[in-house]
Amino acid sequence: MKRVLWYLIAGSRGGLNRARIIQAIHDRPYNVNQLSRELELDYKTIKHHVDVLEDHKLIVKSAVEKYGAQYFLSNDLEENYSLFLEILSKSKK
């Protein structure tokens, strides 16, 4: 988990946007359109970052529907949220 978070948050372009998505989803579930409005980013940008986070099993999608599906933090990320915050704070220095 630590290596994945370092890579996705601190070690690659878009890390700040992915961190913002994680923080938003930590507060409550969102779909891509809601995240786009909340974070004031283009829908396609959010969709790309959500796909990356989902591919790395950091967030999970509700199984209800494809369009409008809500995203939640994965159990692994929930358990390691303090690690995420630590990496985020170090990556901003």
Image (tube, helix red, strand yellow):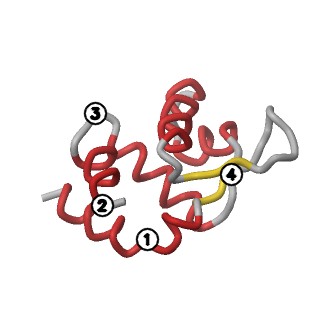
Front: mark 1 or 2: 2
- Amino acid identity at mark 4: Tyr
Q: Callout 4 environment at 10 Å: few (<14), some (14 to 19), or many (20+)?
A: many
Q: Which residue is mark 1?
A: 81
Q: Which residue is mark 2?
A: 2
Q: Position of residue 57 (x, y in %)?
A: 53, 49
Callout 2 secondary element: helix
Q: Earlier in the sequence, mark 1 or mark 2?
A: 2
Q: Callout 2 environment at 10 Å: few (<14), some (14 to 19), or many (20+)?
A: few
- Tell me the residue at 43%/71% (across/down): 81
Q: Tell me if label 4 and label 1 are in contact, CB under 8 Å.
A: no
Residue 13's tag is 3
Q: Tell me if label 2 and label 3 are in contact, CB under 8 Å.
A: no
Q: What's the distance in space between the residues labelled 1 and 2, CA to CA?
A: 11 Å
Quadrant location of the C terminus in the rendered image: bottom left
Residue 30's tag is 4
Quadrant location of the N terminus in the rendered image: bottom left
Q: Position of residue 15 (x, y in %)?
A: 32, 43
Front: mark 1 or 3: 1
Q: Earlier in the sequence, mark 4 or mark 1?
A: 4
- Tell me the residue at 58%/31% (across/down): 47
